[in-house]
Amino acid sequence: MNRRFLIASGGTGGHFYPGLALGKELRRQGLAVLFIVRKNDPAAQILETHKLRYREIDFTGLPRSVNPLRHIRFVYKFFKSLLETRRIIKDFRPDAAIGTGGYISFPLIFTAHFMGIKTAVHDSNARLGLANKVCGKFADLFMLGLPVKKKIKNAVLTSTPIRREFAEKPDRNAVLEGLGLDPQKRTALIFGGSQGAKGLNAACAQIIRKLAPKLASWQFIHITGERWFGVIRQEYTGFSNVSVMPYSHEIYALMHVADLAVCRSGASTLAELMYCHLPAILVPFPHAAANHQFYNAKILANARCARLVPEDKNLAPHLAQVFERLTGKNRDLYYMRSAYSRLRIPNPMTAAKEIVRRLKNL
Ligand SMILES: CC(=O)N[C@H]1[C@@H](OP(=O)(O)OP(=O)(O)OC[C@H]2O[C@@H](n3ccc(=O)[nH]c3=O)[C@H](O)[C@@H]2O)O[C@H](CO)[C@@H](O)[C@@H]1O
């Protein structure tokens, strides 16, 4: 009979997309897959687009406020979610339950474990999230996107799955000309996480405006995030060597044609940089849980594939200094690019396949 896999995923894009890649690979291999997502999670819509089945549960993360009513509501929803999950497990009868991070993993891994079902979790970051720390105590398999310092039971490094589109090498001339840019010039790609990044946007615009006349052989693609598009586009008025956009659905093509990225250090971004061997200046999101973006960035910085610039009051001058050095010395970029071949992290493009292989062996 067909093996059956139940995946809890959703919340941020960073937690959801690796789960989606995994679900698609399970289906590609002819295995049955069902998702559990939080009620009203926009991830449900994306699952529908991909024709993947899902069930919703009513659950929220730990309340941050001290309001006792919120805590009572949390406890109520917590027990309710365990009962809902139990029902789903009884209906679907999975061979294994998988959580891809975020608090939605907890009810599934906890319930499945006590119902005698094999469990696995995947954490993309170099510092584990709270839900995964707890789930790790029950999991039969703990898959890691990046190496972590902490000793974890049943852990294996699999990397984080990325979109298949990254495997298609684009035509550099066509991509750059399509953006009104010059294929002869070197190109820096600037972007935040899936939402953009306010501080990074402002610092980059300031630096590019100042350095552009000195850097005639360089041009820039600046992805601002929807919220900041208008303001940042204004800043570049009169600059013909900058292409500004609010979001790119084809960032995989841009990463392949770029010579340097200036970006955040979310886990999927890192896996994509690794796959494209793209040298980067990483500016970790300073408010990420347990400062995990800093630890993510450190892995690429220690391996010399990237430079790490913290977002503090010196962001603009520090970034300008690193940026000027890298754009002035092509040799540095060459060494950074080649340093990726020495990274001892599995290929993110085959990560979904590898995860499925391990799940089948549980
Ligand atoms: C702010 C925050 O806490 N973010 C976290 C969130 O990911 P978050 O989703 O913010 O960040 P990630 O780097 O993991 O993913 C961003 C994704 O958006 C894509 N992209 C971005 C811009 C664009 O124009 N087009 C586009 O497709 C990138 O290619 C990438 O695939 O969960 C991740 C996994 O737990 C964490 O590592 C991140 O730290």
Image (cartoon, helix red, strand yellow):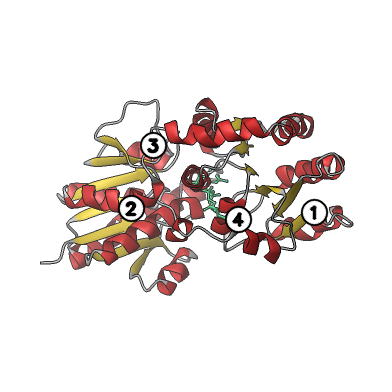
* Dot 4 crowding, Cα within 10 Å, few <14, some 14–19, many 20+: many
Q: Nearer the viewer, mark 1 or mark 2?
A: 1
User: Residue 345 shows which numbered tag?
Assistant: 3
Across and down, in percent, residue 17 comes to: 44, 56
Question: For the residue marked with disc 2, what is the amino acid?
Answer: Ala
Q: Nearer the viewer, mark 3 or mark 1?
A: 1
Q: Nearer the viewer, mark 4 or mark 2?
A: 4
Helix, strand or loop at disc 2? helix
Image quarter hosting the N terminus: bottom left
Measured Cα–Cα span from mark 4 to mark 2: 23 Å
Q: Name the residue that disc number 4 marks.
A: 254
Q: Which numbered disc, 4 or 2, marks the residue that appears first in the sequence?
A: 4
Q: Nearer the viewer, mark 3 or mark 4?
A: 4
Task: Identify the residue shown where x is 36% and y is 40%.
Answer: 346
Helix, strand or loop at disc 3? loop
* Dot 3 crowding, Cα within 10 Å, few <14, some 14–19, many 20+: some
Check contact, mark 4 vs mark 2: CB within 8 A: no
Query: Which residue lies most toward the left here?
Result: 1
